[in-house]
Image (tube, rainbow, N blue to C red):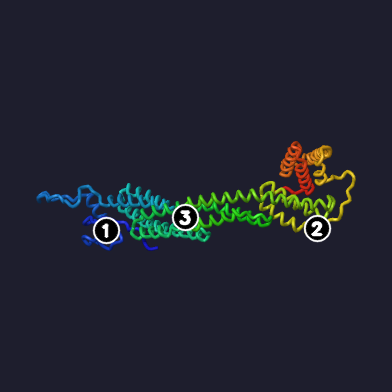
Amino acid sequence: MSSTLAPPTSDCPVCEAENPTTAASCATCGYPTGLAVDALRGLSETEAVPLPSAPSRPKAPPRATRPAGRDPTADQVEKTAHELDRTVRLVSRLGGPTADVTVELHQAALTQADGRTVEALSLLRSALARLHEATNESLGRRLRSLEERQTTLRNEGVAVSFGAETVRIRAEIEAGRTEQAIDRLVEADEQLGRIETDWKGLKGLLRQIDGLRDSAEVVGRPVAEVEEAVQQVKTLLSQPDLSTDTLDEGAQIAARALMLLNEALPPAIEQELERHAQALAAFGPDHAPSRPARTVHAEATRHLRRGKIVEATTRLRELRVAIGELGTPEPLVRRDGDDPGPELATDATADPESAENALARLLTKARGLAARVRSLPSDSELAYEAAGEIRRATEQLRARKLEDADATLSRLMRTLEAEVPQEP
Protein backbone atom coordinates (compact mmCIF):
# COMPACT_ATOMS: atom_id res chain seq x y z
CA MET A 1 0.00 0.00 0.00
CA SER A 2 1.26 3.42 -0.81
CA SER A 3 1.78 6.08 1.85
CA THR A 4 -1.66 7.01 3.07
CA LEU A 5 -1.27 9.61 5.80
CA ALA A 6 -0.48 13.28 5.20
CA PRO A 7 3.05 13.94 6.56
CA PRO A 8 3.42 16.07 9.73
CA THR A 9 4.04 19.80 9.30
CA SER A 10 6.11 22.40 11.10
CA ASP A 11 6.50 26.18 11.08
CA CYS A 12 9.46 27.79 9.32
CA PRO A 13 11.75 29.37 11.97
CA VAL A 14 12.33 32.39 9.71
CA CYS A 15 8.94 33.36 8.24
CA GLU A 16 6.69 31.05 10.34
CA ALA A 17 5.06 29.59 7.22
CA GLU A 18 3.67 26.03 7.67
CA ASN A 19 5.56 23.42 5.63
CA PRO A 20 5.62 19.57 5.51
CA THR A 21 8.60 18.20 7.42
CA THR A 22 9.53 16.23 4.31
CA ALA A 23 9.99 19.45 2.23
CA ALA A 24 13.58 20.36 1.34
CA SER A 25 13.04 24.07 1.95
CA CYS A 26 10.39 26.58 3.01
CA ALA A 27 7.95 27.29 0.19
CA THR A 28 7.70 30.96 1.28
CA CYS A 29 11.21 32.15 2.11
CA GLY A 30 13.32 29.23 0.84
CA TYR A 31 15.01 28.50 4.20
CA PRO A 32 16.33 24.89 4.28
CA THR A 33 14.12 22.72 6.52
CA GLY A 34 17.13 20.56 7.41
CA LEU A 35 18.50 23.51 9.41
CA ALA A 36 15.21 24.23 11.16
CA VAL A 37 16.17 22.54 14.43
CA ASP A 38 19.46 24.49 14.61
CA ALA A 39 17.63 27.73 13.83
CA LEU A 40 15.07 27.05 16.54
CA ARG A 41 17.84 26.33 19.02
CA GLY A 42 19.55 29.59 18.10
CA LEU A 43 16.33 31.57 18.39
CA SER A 44 15.63 30.05 21.81
CA GLU A 45 19.08 30.97 23.11
CA THR A 46 18.78 34.48 21.67
CA GLU A 47 15.43 35.10 23.31
CA ALA A 48 16.50 33.55 26.59
CA VAL A 49 19.54 35.95 26.88
CA PRO A 50 18.74 39.25 25.12
CA LEU A 51 21.74 41.23 23.80
CA PRO A 52 22.47 44.60 25.63
CA SER A 53 22.03 47.75 23.60
CA ALA A 54 24.63 50.59 23.49
CA PRO A 55 23.54 53.61 25.67
CA SER A 56 24.83 56.19 23.21
CA ARG A 57 22.76 54.90 20.32
CA PRO A 58 19.03 55.53 19.99
CA LYS A 59 16.75 52.57 20.71
CA ALA A 60 15.64 50.71 17.67
CA PRO A 61 11.92 50.25 17.21
CA PRO A 62 10.66 46.89 18.60
CA ARG A 63 10.59 43.97 16.19
CA ALA A 64 7.08 43.10 15.18
CA THR A 65 7.92 39.74 13.65
CA ARG A 66 7.95 37.70 16.87
CA PRO A 67 6.18 38.48 20.18
CA ALA A 68 8.46 38.92 23.16
CA GLY A 69 8.95 35.80 25.25
CA ARG A 70 7.50 33.39 22.71
CA ASP A 71 9.45 30.15 22.28
CA PRO A 72 8.97 28.85 18.72
CA THR A 73 10.37 25.46 19.63
CA ALA A 74 7.87 25.10 22.49
CA ASP A 75 5.07 25.92 20.05
CA GLN A 76 6.29 23.19 17.74
CA VAL A 77 6.47 20.74 20.65
CA GLU A 78 2.88 21.50 21.65
CA LYS A 79 1.61 21.20 18.10
CA THR A 80 3.43 17.93 17.47
CA ALA A 81 2.22 16.51 20.79
CA HIS A 82 -1.40 17.24 19.85
CA GLU A 83 -0.94 15.58 16.47
CA LEU A 84 0.71 12.60 18.14
CA ASP A 85 -2.14 12.24 20.63
CA ARG A 86 -4.73 12.31 17.83
CA THR A 87 -2.82 9.69 15.84
CA VAL A 88 -2.51 7.44 18.91
CA ARG A 89 -6.30 7.42 19.22
CA LEU A 90 -6.65 6.50 15.56
CA VAL A 91 -4.18 3.64 15.85
CA SER A 92 -5.96 2.40 18.98
CA ARG A 93 -9.24 2.17 17.05
CA LEU A 94 -7.47 -0.05 14.53
CA GLY A 95 -5.98 -2.24 17.23
CA GLY A 96 -2.41 -1.23 16.42
CA PRO A 97 0.47 -0.99 18.95
CA THR A 98 0.95 2.33 20.76
CA ALA A 99 2.85 1.36 23.91
CA ASP A 100 6.29 2.43 22.66
CA VAL A 101 4.91 5.80 21.53
CA THR A 102 3.39 6.40 24.96
CA VAL A 103 6.79 5.81 26.53
CA GLU A 104 8.33 8.31 24.15
CA LEU A 105 5.67 10.89 25.01
CA HIS A 106 6.61 10.64 28.68
CA GLN A 107 10.30 10.89 27.82
CA ALA A 108 9.70 13.99 25.69
CA ALA A 109 7.73 15.63 28.50
CA LEU A 110 10.57 15.03 30.95
CA THR A 111 13.10 16.32 28.43
CA GLN A 112 11.12 19.49 27.87
CA ALA A 113 10.78 19.99 31.64
CA ASP A 114 14.60 19.95 31.82
CA GLY A 115 14.68 22.82 29.34
CA ARG A 116 15.84 20.70 26.39
CA THR A 117 12.97 21.76 24.17
CA VAL A 118 14.67 21.06 20.84
CA GLU A 119 15.53 17.50 21.92
CA ALA A 120 11.93 16.97 23.04
CA LEU A 121 10.72 18.16 19.64
CA SER A 122 13.04 15.71 17.90
CA LEU A 123 11.69 12.84 20.03
CA LEU A 124 8.09 13.74 19.27
CA ARG A 125 8.65 14.07 15.53
CA SER A 126 10.42 10.73 15.42
CA ALA A 127 7.55 9.07 17.30
CA LEU A 128 4.96 10.72 15.04
CA ALA A 129 6.67 9.49 11.89
CA ARG A 130 6.73 5.91 13.22
CA LEU A 131 3.12 6.16 14.32
CA HIS A 132 2.02 7.34 10.88
CA GLU A 133 3.73 4.30 9.40
CA ALA A 134 2.05 2.04 11.98
CA THR A 135 -1.34 3.57 11.15
CA ASN A 136 -0.85 2.88 7.45
CA GLU A 137 0.15 -0.71 8.18
CA SER A 138 -2.84 -1.26 10.48
CA LEU A 139 -5.22 0.21 7.91
CA GLY A 140 -3.86 -2.05 5.19
CA ARG A 141 -3.95 -5.12 7.44
CA ARG A 142 -7.52 -4.52 8.59
CA LEU A 143 -8.69 -3.85 5.04
CA ARG A 144 -7.10 -7.07 3.77
CA SER A 145 -8.69 -8.97 6.67
CA LEU A 146 -12.10 -7.55 5.74
CA GLU A 147 -11.69 -8.71 2.15
CA GLU A 148 -10.46 -12.17 3.19
CA ARG A 149 -13.40 -12.69 5.56
CA GLN A 150 -15.78 -11.65 2.81
CA THR A 151 -14.18 -14.19 0.46
CA THR A 152 -14.53 -16.93 3.07
CA LEU A 153 -18.25 -16.25 3.45
CA ARG A 154 -18.79 -16.17 -0.30
CA ASN A 155 -17.01 -19.52 -0.65
CA GLU A 156 -19.49 -20.93 1.89
CA GLY A 157 -22.45 -19.75 -0.18
CA VAL A 158 -23.16 -16.46 1.63
CA ALA A 159 -23.38 -13.64 -0.95
CA VAL A 160 -21.96 -10.79 1.13
CA SER A 161 -20.55 -7.83 -0.77
CA PHE A 162 -18.37 -5.11 0.75
CA GLY A 163 -16.51 -4.37 -2.48
CA ALA A 164 -18.00 -0.91 -2.95
CA GLU A 165 -17.21 0.01 0.65
CA THR A 166 -13.59 -1.11 0.40
CA VAL A 167 -13.22 1.08 -2.71
CA ARG A 168 -14.49 4.09 -0.72
CA ILE A 169 -12.12 3.30 2.15
CA ARG A 170 -9.14 3.17 -0.19
CA ALA A 171 -10.20 6.47 -1.75
CA GLU A 172 -10.31 8.11 1.68
CA ILE A 173 -6.84 6.76 2.45
CA GLU A 174 -5.34 7.99 -0.80
CA ALA A 175 -6.87 11.45 -0.18
CA GLY A 176 -5.21 11.58 3.24
CA ARG A 177 -8.55 11.51 5.10
CA THR A 178 -7.37 8.93 7.58
CA GLU A 179 -10.02 9.50 10.22
CA GLN A 180 -12.85 9.15 7.70
CA ALA A 181 -11.26 5.98 6.34
CA ILE A 182 -11.05 4.50 9.82
CA ASP A 183 -14.69 5.37 10.52
CA ARG A 184 -15.80 3.53 7.40
CA LEU A 185 -13.52 0.58 8.09
CA VAL A 186 -14.69 0.12 11.69
CA GLU A 187 -18.34 0.30 10.67
CA ALA A 188 -17.85 -2.25 7.86
CA ASP A 189 -15.92 -4.52 10.20
CA GLU A 190 -18.70 -4.47 12.81
CA GLN A 191 -21.36 -5.15 10.18
CA LEU A 192 -19.42 -8.08 8.79
CA GLY A 193 -18.89 -9.41 12.32
CA ARG A 194 -22.66 -9.48 12.92
CA ILE A 195 -23.19 -11.34 9.65
CA GLU A 196 -20.50 -13.87 10.59
CA THR A 197 -22.13 -14.50 13.98
CA ASP A 198 -25.60 -14.98 12.50
CA TRP A 199 -24.24 -17.19 9.73
CA LYS A 200 -22.48 -19.37 12.30
CA GLY A 201 -25.82 -20.06 14.03
CA LEU A 202 -27.62 -20.73 10.75
CA LYS A 203 -24.81 -22.98 9.56
CA GLY A 204 -25.18 -25.05 12.73
CA LEU A 205 -28.89 -25.55 12.02
CA LEU A 206 -28.19 -26.54 8.41
CA ARG A 207 -25.56 -29.03 9.57
CA GLN A 208 -28.09 -30.68 11.89
CA ILE A 209 -30.65 -30.77 9.08
CA ASP A 210 -28.16 -32.48 6.75
CA GLY A 211 -27.49 -35.17 9.35
CA LEU A 212 -31.20 -35.81 9.91
CA ARG A 213 -31.88 -35.85 6.17
CA ASP A 214 -29.40 -38.72 5.89
CA SER A 215 -31.21 -40.46 8.75
CA ALA A 216 -34.52 -39.94 6.96
CA GLU A 217 -33.12 -41.71 3.90
CA VAL A 218 -31.94 -44.62 6.06
CA VAL A 219 -35.37 -45.20 7.61
CA GLY A 220 -37.20 -44.36 4.38
CA ARG A 221 -39.04 -41.32 5.74
CA PRO A 222 -38.02 -38.24 3.70
CA VAL A 223 -39.93 -35.08 4.62
CA ALA A 224 -40.87 -33.01 1.56
CA GLU A 225 -41.32 -29.80 3.57
CA VAL A 226 -37.71 -30.03 4.72
CA GLU A 227 -36.36 -30.14 1.18
CA GLU A 228 -38.41 -27.06 0.31
CA ALA A 229 -37.13 -25.26 3.40
CA VAL A 230 -33.49 -25.99 2.53
CA GLN A 231 -34.00 -24.56 -0.95
CA GLN A 232 -35.59 -21.43 0.52
CA VAL A 233 -32.59 -20.88 2.78
CA LYS A 234 -30.17 -21.30 -0.14
CA THR A 235 -32.16 -18.74 -2.14
CA LEU A 236 -31.96 -16.25 0.74
CA LEU A 237 -28.21 -16.73 1.07
CA SER A 238 -27.70 -16.01 -2.62
CA GLN A 239 -29.36 -12.59 -2.43
CA PRO A 240 -27.00 -9.63 -3.00
CA ASP A 241 -26.22 -7.27 -0.13
CA LEU A 242 -27.06 -9.90 2.46
CA SER A 243 -28.18 -8.47 5.82
CA THR A 244 -28.63 -9.82 9.32
CA ASP A 245 -32.42 -9.65 8.81
CA THR A 246 -32.11 -12.04 5.88
CA LEU A 247 -30.00 -14.42 7.95
CA ASP A 248 -32.55 -14.27 10.77
CA GLU A 249 -35.31 -15.21 8.33
CA GLY A 250 -33.22 -18.12 7.10
CA ALA A 251 -32.62 -19.29 10.69
CA GLN A 252 -36.37 -19.34 11.37
CA ILE A 253 -37.00 -21.43 8.25
CA ALA A 254 -34.21 -23.86 9.18
CA ALA A 255 -35.49 -24.18 12.76
CA ARG A 256 -38.95 -25.16 11.53
CA ALA A 257 -37.45 -27.76 9.17
CA LEU A 258 -35.37 -29.20 12.00
CA MET A 259 -38.47 -29.48 14.18
CA LEU A 260 -40.30 -31.41 11.44
CA LEU A 261 -37.44 -33.92 11.18
CA ASN A 262 -37.26 -34.37 14.95
CA GLU A 263 -40.98 -35.11 15.00
CA ALA A 264 -41.10 -37.46 12.00
CA LEU A 265 -38.04 -39.66 12.48
CA PRO A 266 -38.27 -41.09 16.04
CA PRO A 267 -41.56 -42.99 15.46
CA ALA A 268 -40.19 -44.53 12.25
CA ILE A 269 -36.94 -45.60 13.94
CA GLU A 270 -38.84 -47.00 16.92
CA GLN A 271 -41.10 -49.07 14.66
CA GLU A 272 -38.12 -50.61 12.91
CA LEU A 273 -36.37 -51.31 16.20
CA GLU A 274 -39.49 -53.10 17.41
CA ARG A 275 -39.50 -55.31 14.29
CA HIS A 276 -35.85 -56.14 14.87
CA ALA A 277 -36.61 -56.90 18.52
CA GLN A 278 -39.19 -59.48 17.48
CA ALA A 279 -36.70 -60.99 15.04
CA LEU A 280 -34.07 -61.29 17.80
CA ALA A 281 -36.63 -62.76 20.22
CA ALA A 282 -37.11 -65.64 17.79
CA PHE A 283 -33.54 -66.78 18.45
CA GLY A 284 -34.15 -67.14 22.19
CA PRO A 285 -32.36 -65.47 25.13
CA ASP A 286 -29.58 -68.12 25.25
CA HIS A 287 -28.58 -67.78 21.59
CA ALA A 288 -24.93 -66.61 21.85
CA PRO A 289 -24.44 -65.54 18.17
CA SER A 290 -27.29 -63.05 18.49
CA ARG A 291 -25.82 -61.30 21.55
CA PRO A 292 -23.81 -58.69 19.49
CA ALA A 293 -26.97 -57.80 17.59
CA ARG A 294 -28.88 -57.44 20.87
CA THR A 295 -26.16 -55.10 22.14
CA VAL A 296 -26.40 -52.93 19.01
CA HIS A 297 -30.20 -52.93 19.34
CA ALA A 298 -29.96 -51.77 22.94
CA GLU A 299 -27.50 -48.99 21.98
CA ALA A 300 -29.80 -47.79 19.20
CA THR A 301 -32.72 -47.74 21.62
CA ARG A 302 -30.77 -45.74 24.19
CA HIS A 303 -29.65 -43.19 21.60
CA LEU A 304 -33.24 -42.80 20.43
CA ARG A 305 -34.46 -42.25 24.00
CA ARG A 306 -31.88 -39.47 24.41
CA GLY A 307 -32.94 -37.78 21.19
CA LYS A 308 -29.69 -38.64 19.39
CA ILE A 309 -31.35 -39.52 16.12
CA VAL A 310 -28.21 -39.55 13.98
CA GLU A 311 -26.42 -41.92 16.38
CA ALA A 312 -29.52 -44.13 16.60
CA THR A 313 -29.65 -44.34 12.82
CA THR A 314 -25.98 -45.31 12.66
CA ARG A 315 -26.63 -48.20 15.06
CA LEU A 316 -29.73 -49.10 13.07
CA ARG A 317 -27.58 -49.64 9.97
CA GLU A 318 -25.28 -51.91 11.97
CA LEU A 319 -28.26 -53.77 13.39
CA ARG A 320 -29.62 -54.53 9.94
CA VAL A 321 -26.30 -56.06 8.94
CA ALA A 322 -26.00 -58.04 12.17
CA ILE A 323 -29.52 -59.51 11.91
CA GLY A 324 -28.97 -60.34 8.24
CA GLU A 325 -25.87 -62.36 9.17
CA LEU A 326 -27.80 -64.41 11.76
CA GLY A 327 -29.95 -66.08 9.15
CA THR A 328 -33.22 -67.88 9.96
CA PRO A 329 -33.83 -68.89 13.58
CA GLU A 330 -34.51 -72.47 14.54
CA PRO A 331 -37.99 -73.26 15.96
CA LEU A 332 -38.12 -72.68 19.70
CA VAL A 333 -39.35 -75.36 22.08
CA ARG A 334 -41.21 -73.49 24.82
CA ARG A 335 -40.82 -74.80 28.34
CA ASP A 336 -43.27 -74.49 31.20
CA GLY A 337 -42.90 -71.18 32.99
CA ASP A 338 -41.39 -69.35 30.00
CA ASP A 339 -42.65 -65.89 29.29
CA PRO A 340 -45.41 -66.31 26.68
CA GLY A 341 -44.26 -63.09 24.98
CA PRO A 342 -46.13 -60.12 23.60
CA GLU A 343 -48.19 -62.23 21.22
CA LEU A 344 -49.86 -64.15 24.02
CA ALA A 345 -50.31 -61.00 26.01
CA THR A 346 -52.08 -59.43 23.07
CA ASP A 347 -54.36 -62.39 22.75
CA ALA A 348 -55.00 -62.38 26.48
CA THR A 349 -56.59 -58.95 26.26
CA ALA A 350 -59.28 -60.35 24.02
CA ASP A 351 -61.46 -61.48 26.93
CA PRO A 352 -61.76 -60.01 30.45
CA GLU A 353 -60.70 -63.13 32.33
CA SER A 354 -57.44 -63.55 30.36
CA ALA A 355 -56.75 -59.80 30.69
CA GLU A 356 -56.56 -60.20 34.47
CA ASN A 357 -54.06 -63.01 34.06
CA ALA A 358 -52.01 -60.91 31.62
CA LEU A 359 -52.06 -57.99 34.05
CA ALA A 360 -50.80 -60.17 36.87
CA ARG A 361 -48.04 -61.58 34.66
CA LEU A 362 -46.93 -58.12 33.57
CA LEU A 363 -46.91 -56.84 37.15
CA THR A 364 -44.67 -59.74 38.13
CA LYS A 365 -42.42 -58.99 35.17
CA ALA A 366 -42.28 -55.28 36.13
CA ARG A 367 -41.34 -56.11 39.74
CA GLY A 368 -38.54 -58.39 38.60
CA LEU A 369 -37.15 -55.76 36.25
CA ALA A 370 -37.43 -53.07 38.93
CA ALA A 371 -35.32 -55.24 41.25
CA ARG A 372 -32.66 -55.55 38.54
CA VAL A 373 -32.71 -51.78 38.00
CA ARG A 374 -32.19 -51.16 41.72
CA SER A 375 -29.04 -53.29 41.58
CA LEU A 376 -27.47 -50.96 39.00
CA PRO A 377 -25.13 -48.14 40.11
CA SER A 378 -27.44 -45.30 41.16
CA ASP A 379 -25.41 -42.64 39.32
CA SER A 380 -25.31 -44.49 35.99
CA GLU A 381 -27.20 -43.35 32.91
CA LEU A 382 -28.48 -46.88 32.39
CA ALA A 383 -30.10 -46.87 35.83
CA TYR A 384 -31.70 -43.48 35.17
CA GLU A 385 -33.12 -44.55 31.81
CA ALA A 386 -34.25 -47.95 33.11
CA ALA A 387 -36.10 -46.27 35.98
CA GLY A 388 -37.87 -44.10 33.43
CA GLU A 389 -38.95 -47.18 31.48
CA ILE A 390 -40.29 -48.79 34.69
CA ARG A 391 -42.33 -45.66 35.40
CA ARG A 392 -43.65 -45.63 31.84
CA ALA A 393 -44.68 -49.30 32.04
CA THR A 394 -46.36 -48.73 35.42
CA GLU A 395 -48.46 -45.88 34.02
CA GLN A 396 -49.44 -48.04 31.05
CA LEU A 397 -50.51 -50.87 33.36
CA ARG A 398 -52.62 -48.49 35.42
CA ALA A 399 -54.33 -47.36 32.21
CA ARG A 400 -54.84 -51.03 31.23
CA LYS A 401 -52.72 -50.55 28.12
CA LEU A 402 -51.35 -54.06 28.39
CA GLU A 403 -49.84 -54.26 24.91
CA ASP A 404 -47.92 -51.03 25.38
CA ALA A 405 -46.75 -52.05 28.84
CA ASP A 406 -45.60 -55.45 27.59
CA ALA A 407 -43.63 -53.79 24.77
CA THR A 408 -42.02 -51.33 27.21
CA LEU A 409 -41.01 -54.08 29.65
CA SER A 410 -39.69 -56.32 26.86
CA ARG A 411 -37.61 -53.44 25.51
CA LEU A 412 -36.20 -52.80 28.98
CA MET A 413 -35.41 -56.46 29.42
CA ARG A 414 -33.45 -56.54 26.18
CA THR A 415 -31.53 -53.45 27.23
CA LEU A 416 -30.58 -54.95 30.59
CA GLU A 417 -29.64 -58.28 29.05
CA ALA A 418 -27.36 -56.57 26.55
CA GLU A 419 -25.54 -54.83 29.44
CA VAL A 420 -24.65 -51.81 27.31
CA PRO A 421 -21.57 -50.01 28.74
CA GLN A 422 -22.14 -46.45 29.88
CA GLU A 423 -21.01 -43.68 27.58
CA PRO A 424 -18.71 -41.06 29.10
- Nearer to us of marks 1 and 2 is 2
Residue 348 shown left or right of residue 180 in the figure: right
- Marking on residue 242: 3
Mark 3 crowdedness (10 Å alpha carbons): few <14, some 14-19, many ≥20? some
Q: Give the numbered dot on residue 104.
A: none
SS state under label 1 = strand
Q: Is residue 79 above or below residue 373?
A: below
Secondary structure category for the residue under label 3:
loop
Q: Which residue is mark 1?
A: 19
Q: Earlier in the sequence, mark 1 or mark 3?
A: 1
Q: Name which residue type carries label 2.
A: Leu
Q: Nearer the viewer, residue 240 or 345?
A: 345
Q: Secondary structure at mark 2?
A: helix
- Kindly identify the residue that appears in the image at 42 percent across and 57 percent down: 138
Q: Quadrant of the N terminus?
A: bottom left
Mark 1 belongs to which amino acid? Asn
> What type is the residue that disc 3 sits on?
Leu
Residue occupied by mark 2? 326
The x and y percentages for residue 420 are 75, 49
In this picture, residue 124 sits left or right of residue 28: right
Give the farthest residue toward the right: 336
Q: Earlier in the sequence, mark 2 or mark 3?
A: 3
Residue at 74%, 49% (x, y): give it.
Answer: 421
Distance of label 1 from label 3 (alpha carbons): 47 Å
Would residue 311 be found to the left or right of residue 80 on screen? right
Viewer-proximal residue, 25 or 423? Answer: 423
Residue contact at pointers 1 and 3, CB within 8 angstroms: no
